[in-house]
Each structure stands twice: as structure tokens, then as C-alpha cells.
Image: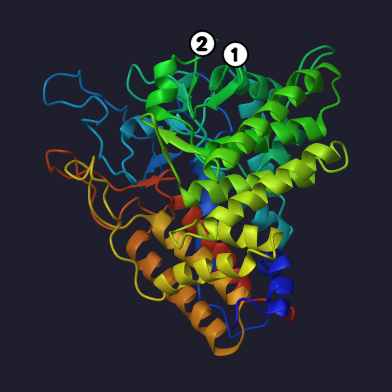
Amino acid sequence: MESGDRPEMTRLMTLLAILAQAPVLPAAEPGYAELARRFADAMITQGTDRWGREHSPQFASMLLRASPAELLPDAVFPVESRGVNRMHVQNLPNIYKGNNRAHKITYRGGDVAADAGLYQLLYEISRDTGDTRYAEAADASLSWFLANAPLHNGLLPWGEHSGWDFRRERADYGYAFDGKHEFDSRWPLWDRFMVLQPKPQPSEWTVLENLSRRLWIGGVNETGERLRYGRHTPLFSFSRPAEAEWAEFGMFPRHGGYYIDLWSTALATTVDDEFPRFMLPRLERFITALERQTDEHGFAAYLEKQTFFFNPRQVASLAVDLEAAAERLERRLPRLSNRMRQLAARQDQAIAMSWRYIHPLDAIRRAQANHAAGPTYVQNFLRTADRYLKPIPPRTLGEEVADVTQAGRIPEQSADAIEVLLLAWSITQGPRARTYLDAANARAREAVDLFLPGDSPLPRSIDRGPELLDGSPFPEFYSSYLGGDDLMWSLWRLSRVTAGDSGR
């Protein structure tokens, strides 16, 4: 395949639709759909909140692989002292991604953001089979969360650092001083939130509108003409972080994109007169700040520890959200929409000069949106896909946690590999396409062997027996933070591709 061919770029425009269809190919690998459905059934029957005084349809994000599945014991964080880090759990395995630590994991209940793969699996099973039980379970969980979990300041207890404590019926967070809100990733189900959020009383704002306001107040700092934003917002207060917060943890372009994604969604769907008067001028100032950064540096700035960086992966993520927001607001706010598209394209120009790693799905989305930059993005994407033609190695351990986190593979790695290989299959032809699909099946077979031993329908969190910090064994457990739900969703999608009933 020549990635710059015009027919190839046309096919990219329909790539996600291709994956949603079911092409005719050789017989399906046995069991993938059954495994995914068994997992979904188990989460519906055993994985919802049945702990504490009040039970709810919200899903647990970590469960022991027992029968029935059980919530893990409460995490015990140490008192900080010389040589002791309070961000590592004493009585549970410390299995991290990158340089993350335990304070970013919900141990005591559920994290709706971490469970995004589960929700998408449930909706897809209902869509593909006509069995509405799965979508109804997802709707019930999200409806309960939106009606009961929003905090007094408008934030939601989810994402990095936060979740919902099933035993105590309250917002959960990591160690005792970690009261932050931070988006874990791009949230894919704002459309369901809009449908399921409680209908506000007259003169009140919706859940999404209150969340939008609070993230502006708690995450954005304006001093004169200078605007900076942070990835953290104080979880329980109405205050802004101190200036040191922005200086130390800084501006991450992907989080700027997540804010734009939310704000544009809320603006595009609001029926309130007051909310646009609050949000629109602030969104415009936010875009102006990003334009000024791009004028000065050539790209949206990544600021950490008072130093500016060029981070291609984060800049590409921002560009994806700018494009989506532009499309969302095109009819209502055409001038702002055009500015956002131009700003996204300027990020592409900077990325085209870098061959460093970009998230593969963001690369494909930018190739769809900007044909001029398409060949560069496609080549970047296919280089990533080619890495997955071989078995997945143990994950790379972050330098800051390498001495405490347990080594090995986690389900998220397999889920990512299957997803990327399916996308690579969909945009290539002939033997090369066959190679990618064969590799997706190979990675899936490896994942089943690694993460689904025994009779439990829940995938385990690591490819070996979990251990505590002192090396003592711990029972196997499921974790959405480590990608267990994403793996099962990827197996379902693979089963639909290989067992389809319509032509390619």
C-alpha cells in the first residue's frame, strides 16, 4: 500500500464504519464472542455495587476472580516517613502503568471513566445481537452515577485520582491528601451522558454544564492576557490550585483537548440561555491562548516544571479534539469552528516534522480530517501496527516506580494491539491486510492464554500471580484500570470482524 494514494485517503474517511460492519472472511476464531459475553454477563450479575448500606447498578472497577466476584479489601496507604512513599499500597499489589502510582487507582469501588471499555462492550453487544439487557445495564449504571455522584461543586468523582467508594457511599480518592479531579482520557460517551443526565429544574444547569463551569473555575488561570490551564482541579472545594500547581504540573495539551471536548459538547446541546453566556467567551479565550502558544512555539505548549516541551503525542490528541469540537459547533458557531480547524491543522504541521510516537487512533483520526497531513499520519500509524506483528513483551516500567511495581504484561497491552491491528487491516489490501488480521488473531489467542486462565469470566490484571510489596502472593483480580474491560471489548470486535456476513 502506498499511504499517499488518493483512494487510500478516501477509504480512511470510512474506516470506523468499516470496523463497525462485519465482512466475509475465514471462519471466526472460536470463543472470542462467547468469552466477551460471559464477561459482560458476569459484570451485570456479580459486578455491580452490592456493598455498603445502599446498593446500586454502578460497576466495580476491581474484583477478585472468585465465585461470586468480590470487591478487593480496602487499600491501606502508609503514613509518610523517611524512605516510605505514601502513594504505594501496603496490602494490595502495586501494578502500575508508566509512572503512575496507587493514588491514581480506585480500589474501593467503581470508576466510571476507567470502565469505558465495559460500557462500550455492553452497548455493542446489544446493538449487534438485539439483546437489550446489556445496553439497559449500561444505561442504569450511568444514570445512577449522573443522578447520585456529582459533588456539590459540580465535579464528578471519576478519572485519575477519584471514583466512588461502594462501602462508604461517597466519592473516593487515593491516599488521604489526594483530592484531585483529572480526566483519565477522552471520554467516549458524552452522547449517553446527555440522554441520561437528570433533567434540571428551571434555572438550573445540567450535569455537563455544571462540570464545564467547575473545570473552568478550578482548572484555568487567567492573569491579564496570559491564560494557563492545569490537568488537576481541586475535587472537593471551589478554590483554584495555587500558582505552584501550574508551574509544577503544568499544561498538558491532551487535557486542554479534553476540556474543549466537554465544553463544545455542552455548548452544542444546551437549551439554557445563561450557560452560553458563561461558557462561550471563555472557550473563545481558551482557543486564543492556544493560538498564541502556536504563534510563539509552532505548537500548543506542553509545560511542566516551568519548562516548555514539544510533545507530539499530546499535540495530536489536542488536534483530534479541536477537529471534533469544530464539527460539533459548525452550525451554531461557524467562525469559532473555523478557527479550531485551522488551529488543529497548525498542530499537524509541527507533528509532520517529528517521527516520534503518536497514539495510533489519534493518527488515524487526523489522517481522516486533514488529507494534506494524511500520509505522515498513516505511516506513523502503520509503524505502530507493525510492532504488534510480534508477541507483546512485558510492559516498560516507569523509572519512578520500577522498584515497587510488579513486572509483566497487562490486558491493556493486548487490547491496544488488537485494536490497532484491526484498524491496520481495514486500511490495507491484499496480503498485507491478511497479515494484520492474522496478527490480531494471534495477539487475541495469546491474551486469552495470559489473562483468562481457569473458569473465571473476568480477565486477570497481570500475566502472572499478583504479589504484594514484600513478595507475598495475592489472589488474582480483575482491573479496568489495567485494561481488563478493554481486552474483552477488543475480543468482541475481533469476533464480529472475522465472523461477518457482509462484503468488504
Asked if residue 81 lies left or right of residue 115, the reply is left
Sequence-first tag of 2 and 1: 1
Q: Quadrant of the N terminus?
A: bottom right
Q: Which amino acid, by three-letter code, is at mark 1?
A: Asn
Instruction: Work out which quarter of the rendered image holds the C terminus and state it.
Output: bottom right
- Which of the 4 image quarters holds residue 6? bottom right
Q: Going 35% across and 52% down the picture, which residue do you hit?
A: 460
Q: Which residue is mark 1?
A: 153
What label sits on residue 248 in the rendered view?
A: none
- Residue at the far bottom: name it: 431
Which element carries disc 2, helix, strand or loop? Answer: loop
Residue 501 left/right relative to 448: right
Give the CA separation, mark 2 to mark 1: 7 Å
State whether residue 195 is above or below residue 82: below
Give the answer, above or below, for where 455 lies relative to 421: above
Q: Is residue 149 visible?
A: no
The image shows residue 241 at horizontal and vertical percentages of 47, 16
Relative to residue 214, is residue 479 depicted above or below? below
Q: Is residue 19 visible?
A: yes
**Percent of width and height locating residue 16:** 68, 63
Front residue of this view, candidates 57 and 152: 152
SS type, badge 1:
loop
Q: Which residue is mark 2?
A: 237
Circle 1 packing at 10 Å, graded few (<14), some (14-19), many (20+), is: some
Residue 54 in the image: above or below residue 90:
above
Say few, some or many: other residues with alpha carbon within 10 Å of mark 2 (under 14 / 14 to 19 / 20 or more). some
Task: Tell me if 219 is positioned left or right of 327 in this view.
Answer: left
Q: Quadrant of residue 496?
A: bottom right
Q: Position of residue 178 (x, y in %)?
A: 37, 21
Residue at far front of view: 296
